[in-house]
Each structure stands twice: as C-alpha cells, then as structure tokens.
C-alpha cells in the first residue's frame, strides 16, 4: 500500500511514501532503518531531546535493505518522467499537550534535476560541492523542513540519470524542540552518507559530515 505524504517540499519532490503491505511487516528493531540512518550520534541527539526512539513500524522501512529495494524498483526501467515515491526511513509520532508532534525522514528519487534552481524560489538553497545541495524552507504554519539533493548514479541507469534524477531526502521535526538548523542538517547529512552507501552510488558523491558555517 502506498499513501501520499504532505510534509515534503512541493517543488523538491512529488513523492509518495511506501507504507505497509497488506500482510503487515515483520517485527524488527524499534528503531528500524531510522536507527541505521541516524547512527549513534543521531539517535543520542534524538533521545536527549525527545526520549526513546521508537518508529511507527507500519509506516517506516524495516531496514535500509528494504529502502534500497524500493529505490531501485523506481529506477529500473529508468523513466525520468515517472511519478516518484520515497521510503519513509523515520516516522515517529507522539501527542504532546493534545497536539501531534512528528519526526520524519524520507529518501527517494527527486522529480526535479540536480541543477534546477526552482528550490531558490521557496526557501534557502545551499550548494556544498558539485554533488550535494541543502534546502531549507518554512511552511505557512511555521514548520521547518530540511532537505538534501545528491547526485547519485544508480546501477543500470543511463548516464543522464546522475543529473536528471538525483537522490533527495527531507527531514521534518516538530517533536524534538531543537530549533538549530545546523544540528538538523548535520544529522541529515550523516543519514545521507548512510543512504548513499546503501544505494551504492557509482559516482561516490562527496557528502560532507557537517554543513557550512553559513547554516546556523
């Protein structure tokens, strides 16, 4: 089963997130792919801010192998005009003072090319190097979304896929209470390094561990 998710950058990705299958998922780690992607430092940061990391098992990938499988399904056969969808790596939802608070992290093929400047019209785009861009925006409700584009050449695709359909990720956080863009981008970049390794990007993109000083 697939379902739309509305917290993604509308101009960055038109993605639909994979959800549960009709038979449900096998039980896995309470952290699932989320713990793999965030790593030790990222999990520690989350748990300092928001308590124990336990994902919604129905809406989150069991592990990165599953996320990789979902990504590769979209890229073979390759169609740059196909509707893209994403793997929900983290989906943590809690009610705080009667309001739902969420922490989500998704990755999927971007529906806009790497060199597109459309993101500059909605938020702030920061180029880190020839392989990586960061994107930050705030919606009308004040919710901040942290995004990343990465040139990632997937096995079996034509050469133009590298720039036509980059890897894209989005982190949304109304749960931890941390307002530091730098902190969020640091953990987003780490998870992107992990995701790029899981996808075996053939061009070996140079993904920094830290955002530049301009990201406060």
Image: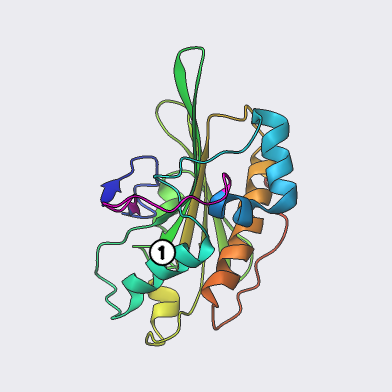
Q: Is residue 125 visible?
A: no
> Is residue 110 a member of the stretch shown in magenta?
no
> Is residue 30 a member of the stretch shown in magenta?
yes
Against 164, is 26 above or below?
Answer: above
Q: Residue at x 37, y 87 (%)?
A: 158
Against 183, is 94 above or below?
Answer: above
Classify residue 57 as left or right of residue 34.
left
Against 144, is 142 above or below?
Answer: above
Q: Which residues are magenta?
A: 17-31
Q: Residue at x 39, y 54 (%)?
A: 12
Quadrant assignment, res 13: bottom left
Q: Which of the pair 76/125 is nearer the observer?
A: 76
Q: Which of the pair 123/67 is nearer the observer?
A: 67
Q: Which residue is mark 1?
A: 116
Q: Which of the pair 6/136 is nearer the observer?
A: 6
The x, y position of residue 185, in whole percent, is: 63, 48
The x, y position of residue 43, in whole percent, is: 68, 44
The x, y position of residue 50, in whole percent, is: 64, 29
Magenta: predominant secondary structure element?
loop
Quadrant assignment, res 30: top right
Q: Is residue 143 visible?
A: yes
């Amino acid at each position: 089963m697939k379902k739309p998710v509305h917290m993604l950058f509308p101009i960055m990705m038109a993605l639909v997130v994979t959800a549960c299958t009709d038979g449900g998922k096998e039980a896995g780690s309470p952290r699932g792919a989320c713990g793999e992607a965030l790593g030790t430092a990222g999990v520690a940061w989350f748990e300092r801010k928001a308590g124990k990391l336990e994902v919604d098992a129905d809406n989150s990938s069991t592990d990165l192998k599953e996320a990789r499988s979902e990504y590769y399904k979209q890229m073979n056969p390759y169609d740059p005009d196909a509707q893209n969808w994403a793997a929900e790596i983290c989906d943590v939802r809690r009610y705080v003072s009667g309001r739902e608070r969420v922490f989500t992290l998704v990755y999927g093929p971007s529906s806009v090319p790497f060199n597109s400047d459309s993101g500059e019209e909605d938020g702030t785009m920061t180029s880190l190097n020839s392989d990586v861009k960061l994107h930050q925006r705030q919606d009308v409700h004040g919710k901040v979304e942290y995004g990343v584009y990465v040139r990632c050449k997937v096995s079996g695709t034509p050469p133009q896929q590298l720039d036509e359909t980059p890897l894209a990720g989005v982190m949304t956080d109304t749960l931890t209470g941390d307002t530091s863009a730098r902190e969020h981008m640091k953990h987003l970049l780490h998870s992107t390094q992990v995701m790029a390794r899981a996808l075996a990007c053939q061009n070996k993109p140079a993904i920094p561990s830290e955002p530049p000083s301009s990201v406060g």
